Amino acid sequence: GQQLNQSPQSMFIQEGEDVSMNCTSSSIFNTWLWYKQDPGEGPVLLIALYKAGELTSNGRLTAQFGITRKDSFLNISASIPSDVGIYFCAGQDTNAGKSTFGDGTTLTVKP
Amino acid sequence: DTGVSQDPRHKITKRGQNVTFRCDPISEHNRLYWYRQTLGQGPEFLTYFQNEAQLEKSRLLSDRFSAERPKGSFSTLEIQRTEQGDSAMYLCASSLRGRGSANTEAFFGQGTRLTVV
């Protein structure tokens, strides 16, 4: 079946640093989604990408939809302690709307 | 609050018991999804509904699992004869599929954490 490879698995950074994480797929997706999940909570949608090559920002977050439609990356600029959490990428099936998720990048921000 | 709502948030049950979870989607959303998430993994798709019709079931959904969305609004997920391997976070999400248009992004509830002892 479809698989998403998300990297890195974990990151430990200093407050104020920029962060970059990416996601690659064996299959093409027409929609890429980035979610953040805090412990014991459900994933919260950060950014949705609908077009190959699209670059979208949400505050300090920027995400890009790869031109091949098989990858995406997420950047966080000037990290702050509340950025701590697990970040998931997801490729969304156009018809069914179901998503295939990566296994997440765990971000730790040291003050 | 008009987000996706799940109940209960936590459930501890003995092996062999039946459990039922409820999900209330965002009110105007016609699609509802169930996912399962285990520690260290991303959510895995289980099943989805468009209105009251269950359109797809994953191979992960064994015959001990059943989901319903009887009036096209809230949904229930029942697990019969629970096993320790069923311990996981069960997540519900909803989205809107418009006529002739692509699916919108899905919004998740807070999940139900199931522990089978």
Image (spheres, rainbow, N blue to C red):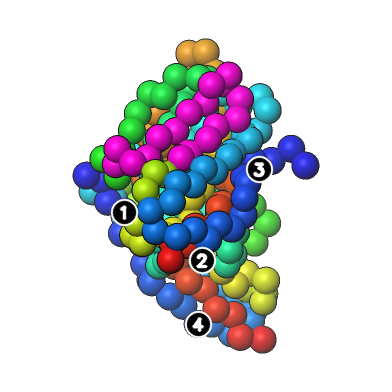
Tell which of B11 and A100 is nearer to you: B11
Q: Is residue B97 magenta?
A: no
Q: Does the magenta stretch include residue B66?
A: yes
The answer to whether the residues at label 4 and label 3 have Cβ atoms under 8 Å apart is: no
Q: Residues within 10 Å of mark 4 (few under 14, many from 20)?
A: few
Residue where numbered disc 3 is placed: B5
The answer to whether the residues at label 1 and label 3 have Cβ atoms under 8 Å apart is: no
Please give left or right for residue A102 compared with residue A85 in the image. Answer: left
Residue at point 64%, 61% (across, down): A60
Instruction: Describe the element under mark 4 as helix, strand or loop.
Output: strand
Residues at marks 2 and 3, CA–CA distance in whole angstroms: 21 Å
Q: Which of marks 1 and 3 is in front?
A: 3
Tell me the kind of residue under disc 4.
Answer: Phe
Residues at marks 2 and 4, CA–CA distance in whole angstroms: 12 Å
The answer to whether the residues at label 2 and label 3 have Cβ atoms under 8 Å apart is: no
> In the rendered image, is residue B58 in sight?
yes
- Span colored in magenta: B61-78
Residue where numbered disc 4 is placed: A12
Residue at point 31%, 53% (across, down): A4
Name the subunit of mark 4.
Answer: A
Q: Which of marks 4 and 3 is in front?
A: 3
Residues at marks 4 and 3, CA–CA distance in whole angstroms: 33 Å
Residue where numbered disc 1 is placed: A4
